[in-house]
Image: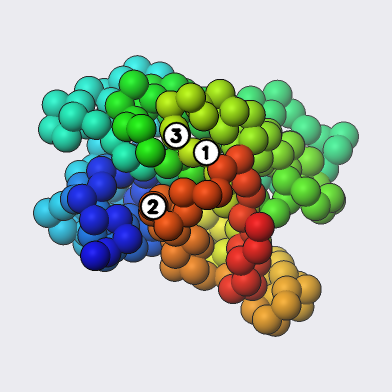
């Protein structure tokens, strides 16, 4: 039997990168239905087309609770419940201390922190006993890279959510874990405002400090998320799994 045989899953930020790779892996592992969300309609439709008829796309923004109400309503009407939620939607942007603006702070906290809270709270009534919640954190939540203070703080908050929510939901037999990727080459890196040369230099540096001498891939993170979503990981709760340079460790 496949790892996710018959399971119903929701992935926010599923139009590209780690979210899309995870949706593909979920379906390959037998998921009965995968719902993905995204803000950009054309990109979302393209992602659903690549996933096939067991996937549904719902346009929405995790910073808007009403959008997440629509997501929950559709899942309730079509599937009736959820077995897995991967709160993946988020973004990264640097700003050195001294030039942090209100827009920068609000943007990161609204998406990466509040968006995770709203996603899980709206999904909770649909989650079945034995369900799995996976939160997308990052290695920067524990590392101190210059210019990334607000983004790092937002991911540290997500790591904390995994630990505390695991305690909150143990009476319902719902597990909560975080996956913390290292540097993964995804389309999101094109949105920082950096030049191609700066992006290339960043990836070269990241590869030089990882055990395998390369950066990680989105499909590698997807396999770790799939493991956490499966019954094979029923003994893991409130944990953080790091995925860096192709190596996973708790």
User: Who's the residue at 32% across and 32% down the image?
Assistant: 128
Q: Nearer the viewer, residue 199 or 211?
A: 211
Q: Quadrant of the C terminus?
A: bottom right
As drawn, the label of residue 51 is none
User: Who's the residue at 73% across and 46% down the image?
Assistant: 141
Pointer 3 with pointer 1, Cβ within 8 A: yes
Earlier sequence position, callout 3 versus callout 2: 3
Q: Where does label 3 land, which residue?
A: 174
Q: Nearer the viewer, residue 32 or 213?
A: 32
Name the spot of residue 4 as percent of width and height, x first.
30, 55
In the picture as drawn, the residue positioned furthest to the top comes out as 66
Give residue 85's quadrant in the image. Answer: top left
Q: Residues within 10 Å of mark 3 (few under 14, many from 20)?
A: many
Name the spot of residue 210 as percent of width and height, x first.
73, 74
Q: Where does label 1 land, which residue?
A: 176
Q: Tell which tag, 1 or 2, sits nearer the viewer.
A: 2
User: Who's the residue at 64% across and 49% down the image?
Assistant: 240
Name the spot of residue 166 as percent of width and height, x first.
57, 33
Q: Tell which tag, 3 or 1, sits nearer the viewer.
A: 3
Res. 179 visible in picture: yes
Say if 9 sits above or below 243 in the image: above
Give residue 73's quadrant in the image. Answer: top left
Earlier sequence position, callout 1 versus callout 2: 1
Pointer 1 with pointer 2, Cβ within 8 A: no
Q: Residues within 10 Å of mark 1 (few under 14, many from 20)?
A: many
In the picture as drawn, the residue positioned furthest to the bottom comes out as 213
Q: Where does label 2 land, which residue?
A: 231
Name the spot of residue 13 as percent of width and height, x first.
41, 44
């Amino acid at each position: 039997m496949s790892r996710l045989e018959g399971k119903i899953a929701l992935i926010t930020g599923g139009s590209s990168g780690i979210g899309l790779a995870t949706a593909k892996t979920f379906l390959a592992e037998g998921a009965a239905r995968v719902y993905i969300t995204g803000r950009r309609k054309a990109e979302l439709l393209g992602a659903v087309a690549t996933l096939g008829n067991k996937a549904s796309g719902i346009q929405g923004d995790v910073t808007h609770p009403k959008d997440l109400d629509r997501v929950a309503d559709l899942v309730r009407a079509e599937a009736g419940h959820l077995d897995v939620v991967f709160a993946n939607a988020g973004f990264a942007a640097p700003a050195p201390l001294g030039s942090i603006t209100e827009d920068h702070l609000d943007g990161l906290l609204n998406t990466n922190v509040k968006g995770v809270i709203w996603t899980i709270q709206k999904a909770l009534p649909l989650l079945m006993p034995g369900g799995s919640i996976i939160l997308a954190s990052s290695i920067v939540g524990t590392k101190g890279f210059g210019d990334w203070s607000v983004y790092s703080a937002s991911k540290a908050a997500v790591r904390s959510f995994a630990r505390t929510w695991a305690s909150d939901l143990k009476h319902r037999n719902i597990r909560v874990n975080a996956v913390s990727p290292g540097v993964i080459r995804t389309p999101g890196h094109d949105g920082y405002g950096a030049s191609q040369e700066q992006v290339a230099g960043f990836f070269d540096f990241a590869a030089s400090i990882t055990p395998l001498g390369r950066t990680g891939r989105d499909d590698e993170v997807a396999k770790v998320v799939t493991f956490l979503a499966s019954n094979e990981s029923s003994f893991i709760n409130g944990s953080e799994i790091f995925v860096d340079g192709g190596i996973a460790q708790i």
